[in-house]
Amino acid sequence: MRLVFFGAPGVGKGTQAQRLAVQERIPQVSTGEILRESVKQGTPLGLQAKGYMESGKLVPDDVVIGLAREKLTSQECSRGYILDGFPRTVAQAEALDRMFQETGSPGLDHVVSLDVPNAEIILRLSGRRSCPTCQTVYHIAHDPPKREGHCDKCGGALVQRADDKPETVEARLKVFDQQTKPLVEYYQKRGLLRRVDSTGDINDVYRRLRKILGLAGA
């Protein structure tokens, strides 16, 4: 099974992708993981990517696609894979399709969009508090500390990350909507898009996901 997962920050995309990958015994592949692995191995494309990353620049699409080609055509991905958060743009999706044609690799089976209303995402993310000392994360509504404002494990003062402030989350969601709307349409036209209601309990979301993908045990 060859899948793409995408969704806005805070929808639980990584959690669901990881769970499905473990249960179906296929790798979860993210752009970040591909980049780190290739840089560590010192491959030609990895060295190219390292140069961009060290100078603080975005790694160009052609390098990312080249790295994806190496990964997706490897033995590790022969049974399938979950592409987590990639492609992010129509240009990347088109390049990925060209890569499938050039290598003779099977194309994608499904593109999964995990959907949560923006208002709920803002509540989810803006309620997070983290401990700078031991990195434990809490949520003021769903998983609060025993003593308000303090970590249960080490007693450190909890903070709200800048990325989790409501105004920052709203800005991130606007960027995501702008980038992904054309991508949704791209895969919808190809009959590959599968939408999953990702509100509510994590286990309920996972059951919906498996059902939409036609997997046993949904």
Image (cartoon, rainbow, N blue to C red):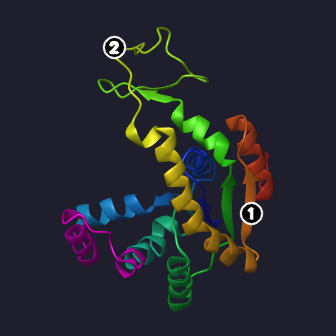
Q: Is residue 27 left or right of residue 40?
A: right
Label placed on residue 216:
none
In the image, residue 50 lies in the stretch drawn in magenta: yes
In the image, residue 43 lies in the stretch drawn in magenta: yes
Q: In which image quadrant can residue 106 be found?
A: bottom right
Q: Which residue is mark 2?
A: 154
The outermost residue toward the front is 167
Residue 208 x, y percent position in the rendering: 78, 48
- Name the one closer to the observer, 8 or 166: 166
Which segment did they paint magenta? Answer: 42-65
Residue 34 x, y percent position in the rendering: 38, 64
Residue 195 x, y percent position in the rendering: 74, 59
**Amino acid at pointer 1:** Arg
Q: Is residue 79 visible?
A: no
Q: In which image quadrant can residue 215 be found?
A: bottom right
- Name the one closer to the observer, 82 or 158: 158
**Figure disc tally:** 2
Estimate how packed mark 2 is, as few (under 14), some (14 to 19) or many (20 or more) residues with alpha carbons within 10 Å: few
User: Dividing the image into 4 quarters, which one contains the N terminus?
Assistant: bottom right
Label placed on residue 194:
1
Q: Residue at x 79, y 46 (%)?
A: 218
Q: Is residue 17 left or right of residue 69?
A: right
Answer with mark 2 or mark 1, whichever residue precedes in sequence. 2
Q: Residue at x 53, y 38 (%)?
A: 125
Q: Secondary structure at mark 1?
A: strand
Q: Where 21 sits versus 178, above or below?
A: above
Q: Secondary structure at mark 2?
A: loop
Q: Residue at x 44, y 78 (%)?
A: 69
Q: Report the predominant secondary structure element of the magenta stretch.
A: helix
